[in-house]
């Protein structure tokens, strides 16, 4: 009897141990593993992309933004006497006054979207609803609301993988501040999670949308509702463009504006290169006048004040804002500049340590702002603010012998200095998860085959991806927009670098306009020379150009390829390299 009791006790003990072990191990094995493509995706568009309405959802509904070009044209020419005065000033070359006239006309036409001097809207407007049942891609496409789908090609591509009913476009008023926008995004994310019965979402933000998403991650990311977060050219640290626009102190570069247009088209017209180096005093005067004339339209938008870099914001708010009337807006913008913008590195890493699968940042580089300034920029957003990287000014380079600062990445074996020798990503918010695309204009990832597909890969990835994961996607990339004509890299090395393993320069024709003829390949460093380069490259094909190296190169060197296309004549593209 006693032996039976002992056996029973042993069996009970073993059973209890098994149950205990199962109670510990079952949750890990029983909880279904999250897959990115099973989760809803939210796309947050760039500045000024969203529609604004009067009396939305009523019989009196009227769209007041975005504008129709024909409406603007007819509005500007409505008064014959005003039109005559402007034309007279144009003939006389009084460009600043012409700018005032045009800017003033724009203000009168778009006055409904202006803000009062106390930083409140002149009238109440609304966006398309942020309600998941009517905001998802499938519903909007099926019911004629596709104008409220932004980044259309990318959103459609995401919807193919995730499902149209689980792909959403967050709507926001371009005029409102980031503090309020991030609150609104929080509410929308909660609605989407409930609507889709999901635990997390994938979040993609571009430009101002990246700013909203980045601010959300700082303020609410530890709620652990985001799986993958991709910030494309995010305005998270502000941009000198906003300061220039508000102050009116412009310095227009027509070459950059024309080449930006070519980038949008994905074709080189040959027009931009004609304008290279041209000084456009008339355009600067026009823009200065335009900012003055249209100033009342946008000067008091909280969003533009949030977009300013901190130093510019503190200077200009004292000069242009009534601190008593604008107290609410100033308090929120102070918080964005003095709290949120100082916490990206800390909060992003905290999110990654506490359940966020990934946060990836993509930055375009290689230009200055469209209307002046000296910062390394993508035409609109400063590289240092978007990434946290230490940068030389536009068209400048680090001093010889520069050593990376390693304030964020402390591993001295990691090389975070760009081929152009002008970006040190070791100081970035996320050094191992930030990519830089040389020669890509602001927001042009969708016209560049190099970055379009990769952006979706990052958004819907289940594996951990960083700058070392894919050989074709190192930290520093060169734009492959078709308007660039050709790309170049040393045959056995990653983009922008040269090691002893390479013996040829591989040139690829990425033009959509047919074959290119390589006329010359020249290095800025006398220790490298190229030969046998008089070759024709068919569309989509590559050739290898042998080179001879007689000594070590300096901190960096450039290779300039001169090529001929029948559509645009003789063109050059210059690539930077570092020998490592």
Image: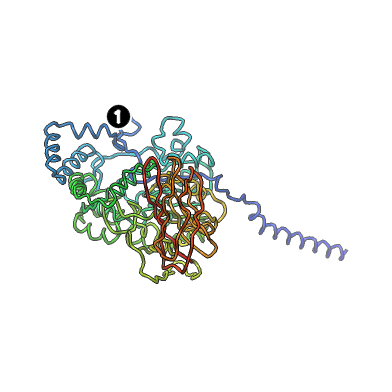
Indicate left or right for 30 with 564 as reference. Answer: right
Image coordinates of residue 238 in percent, x first then y, are 33, 56
Indicate left or right for 136 with 91 as reference. Answer: right
| Front-most of residues 211 and 22 | 211
Q: Determine whether 142 is above or below 234 in the image.
A: above
Residue 95 figure quarter: top left
Indicate left or right for 37 with 287 as reference. Answer: right
Image coordinates of residue 102 in percent, x first then y, are 19, 40
Q: Quadrant of the N terminus?
A: bottom right
| Front-most of residues 54 and 566 | 566
| Front-most of residues 344 and 180 | 344
Residue holding disc 1: 60
Image coordinates of residue 65 in percent, x first then y, are 30, 38
Q: Which residue is depicted at the point 37% across and 57% down?
A: 383
Residue 437 figure quarter: bottom left
| Front-most of residues 343 and 418 | 418
Q: Determine whether 146 is above or below 118 in the image.
A: above
């Amino acid at each position: 009897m006693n032996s039976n009791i002992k056996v029973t006790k042993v069996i009970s003990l073993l059973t209890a141990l098994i149950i205990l072990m199962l109670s510990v191990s079952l949750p890990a094995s029983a909880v279904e593993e999250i897959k990115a493509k099973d989760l809803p995706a939210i796309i947050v568009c760039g500045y000024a992309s969203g529609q604004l309405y009067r009396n939305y959802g009523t019989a009196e509904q009227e769209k007041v933004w975005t504008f129709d070009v024909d409406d603007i044209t007819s509005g500007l020419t409505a008064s014959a006497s005003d039109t005559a005065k402007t034309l007279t000033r144009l003939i006389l070359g009084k460009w600043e006054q012409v700018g005032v006239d045009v800017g003033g006309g724009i203000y009168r036409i778009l006055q409904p979207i202006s803000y009062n001097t106390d930083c409140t809207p002149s009238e109440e407007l609304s966006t398309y609803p942020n309600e998941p049942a009517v905001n998802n891609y499938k519903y909007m496409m099926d019911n004629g609301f596709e104008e409220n789908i932004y980044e259309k090609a990318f959103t459609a591509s995401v919807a193919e993988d995730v499902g149209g009913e689980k792909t959403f476009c967050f709507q926001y008023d371009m005029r409102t501040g980031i503090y309020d926008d991030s609150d609104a995004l929080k509410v929308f994310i909660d609605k989407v999670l409930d609507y889709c019965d999901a635990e997390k979402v994938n979040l993609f933000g571009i430009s101002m949308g990246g700013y909203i998403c980045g601010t959300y991650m700082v303020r609410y990311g530890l709620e652990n509702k985001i799986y993958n977060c991709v910030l494309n050219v995010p305005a998270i640290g502000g941009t000198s463009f906003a300061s220039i626009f508000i102050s009116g102190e412009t310095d227009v570069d027509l070459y950059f504006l024309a080449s930006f247009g070519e980038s949008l088209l994905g074709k080189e017209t040959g027009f931009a290169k004609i304008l290279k180096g041209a000084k456009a005093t008339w355009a600067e005067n026009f823009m200065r006048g335009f900012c003055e004339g249209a100033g009342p339209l946008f000067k008091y938008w909280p969003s533009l004040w949030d977009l300013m870099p901190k130093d510019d914001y503190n200077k200009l708010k004292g000069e242009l804002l009534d601190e008593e009337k604008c107290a609410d807006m100033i308090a929120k913008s102070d918080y964005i500049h003095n709290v949120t913008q100082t916490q990206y590195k800390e909060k992003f890493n905290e999110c990654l340590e506490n359940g966020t699968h990934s946060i990836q940042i993509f930055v375009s580089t290689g230009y200055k702002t469209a209307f002046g300034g000296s910062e390394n920029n993508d035409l609109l957003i400063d590289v240092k603010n978007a990434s946290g990287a230490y940068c030389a000014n536009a068209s400048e380079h680090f001093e010889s012998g520069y050593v990376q600062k390693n304030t964020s990445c402390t591993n001295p074996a990691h090389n975070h200095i760009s081929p152009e020798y002008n970006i040190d990503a070791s100081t970035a918010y996320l050094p191992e998860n930030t990519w830089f695309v040389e020669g890509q204009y602001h927001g042009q990832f969708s016209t560049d085959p190099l970055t379009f597909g990769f952006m979706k890969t990052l958004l819907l990835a289940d594996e951990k991806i960083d700058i070392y994961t894919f050989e074709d996607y190192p930290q520093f990339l060169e734009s492959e927009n078709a308007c660039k004509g050709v790309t170049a890299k040393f045959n056995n090395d990653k983009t922008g670098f040269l090691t002893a393993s390479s013996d040829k320069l591989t040139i690829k024709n990425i033009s959509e306009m047919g074959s290119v003829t390589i006329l010359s390949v020249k290095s800025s460093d006398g220790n490298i020379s190229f030969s046998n380069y008089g070759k024709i490259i068919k569309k989509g094909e590559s050739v290898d150009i042998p080179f001879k190296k007689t000594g070590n190169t300096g901190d960096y060197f450039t290779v300039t390829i001169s090529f001929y296309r029948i559509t645009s004549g003789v063109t050059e593209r210059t690539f930077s390299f570092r020998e490592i």
